[in-house]
Amino acid sequence: MIKVIKHHWGIILYLAFYFFITAYKFINFQTPFYDWDEGIYAQVGREMINKLSLTPLWQGQVWLDKPPLVPLFYGLIGRLPFASELSMRFATLGLSLLVLGLIYVFYYRITKNKSIAFLTVIFTSFIPLFVQRSQVLNVDVFLLLGWMGYIVFFPHFWWSLFFLAVGVLSKSLLGFYPAMMLLGYQVWKKLIAKDKKTANNIKSILTQIIIILSWYLIMLFIYKQDFIRAHFLESHLKRVTSSIESHFGQRTFYFDELFNQLGLIKWLLPLGIIFIFIDFFKKKKNIFYLLFFVPWFLFLNLTKTKITWYLYVIIPQFAFISAYSINLFRKYRIINTVIVLILTGLIINNAIVSSEFFTTHYSQPDKHYQLAI
């Protein structure tokens, strides 16, 4: 542990810094659950705990649209002897920090470059959508936690199963993404190189998927057609085939939103892409892991529903591609360090000072709320 801290002290200090500035904001600028999603997760979780139910409840009625993990988690946190607005948001912040830690581990592991992994975390943590999701109750942070945890702990069956469960029991079918990607990759490796390890990996992934699918079987057995209609048809299929809740957008909606979210670092994307493919063709890096989340982004562009926060889970991918641009200076250690410090300073200054980090609140009363008052 001491060796790890000594080797990666930079990211540890940064995560501590990120925690304290956000905690300061929570404590000094407390706001009620004005946001629609925050109110829903807090209330559904409260009802689940009060009724001792493992199925989401809304106003006493079974709510089959979503899996139970997220509201149950917030319901349990709400039992702590603190104001719910603080305890639940601090819990979300804690999960966000864990996500950032896993992002660092994953990209350090596949690049063996601390600067790239560190910058990926810096870029990710201050992208507006990530900042917003780290400060409000939401399901997306659970999904990204499940995805990152699964690929980081993939060699460990039970840990990866745990994170797969986190992803699926928070966002349902979307939680299977990393498992399906790795399954396809392992099958491809099996076809070109018949080794025992690949075969064992395929068996492990299939076993994990079967275990998680048992939740769907239980829900089907209990709620039958109601579960199919609410959970699969309305909550999943309609989001792909039609625009729900009036969330319309042009064909380039997600590209436009992505570039808007990336801000200044979008100008580093072309250079990062060039270096990724250079390393791939030199057979220095495995492009499958370098671009692991890109297929999900491409799929998003095929769906009819256009919602900005759907981009949340692919933010680390494009932050990483931007950070990969510093490969230009990989042979020059001093220059590399200076570039990392300059980029870090620019991002923090732009996010905290220029963007009014401490005065921007993501849960505010809408106009109809004020009219009601």
Image: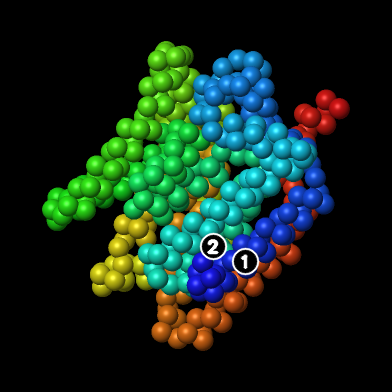
Identified by mark 2, the residue type is Val
Distance between the alpha carbons at the discs numbered 2 and 1: 9 Å
The residue pinned by badge 1 equals 14
Q: How many residues crowd mark 1 within 10 Å: few (<14), some (14–19), many (20+)?
A: some
The quarter holding residue 18 reads bottom right
Q: Is residue 226 above or below residue 289?
A: above
Task: Answer whether residue 322 is visible to the viewer in this image.
Answer: no
Q: Are marks 2 and 1 in contact (CB under 8 Å)?
A: yes
Q: Which of the marked residues, 2 or 1, is nearer the chain's N terminus?
A: 1
Q: Residue at x 58, y 71 (%)?
A: 10
Camera-side mark, 2 or 1 = 1
Numbered mark located on residue 121 in the image: 2
Locate residue 211, reporting x and y percent.
35, 33
Q: Secondary structure at mark 2?
A: helix
Going by the image, does 89 lie left or right of 241?
Answer: right
Q: Position of residue 48 (x, y in %)?
A: 62, 24
Residue 48 sits above or below residue 74 on the image: above
Quick check: 315 above or below 210? Answer: below
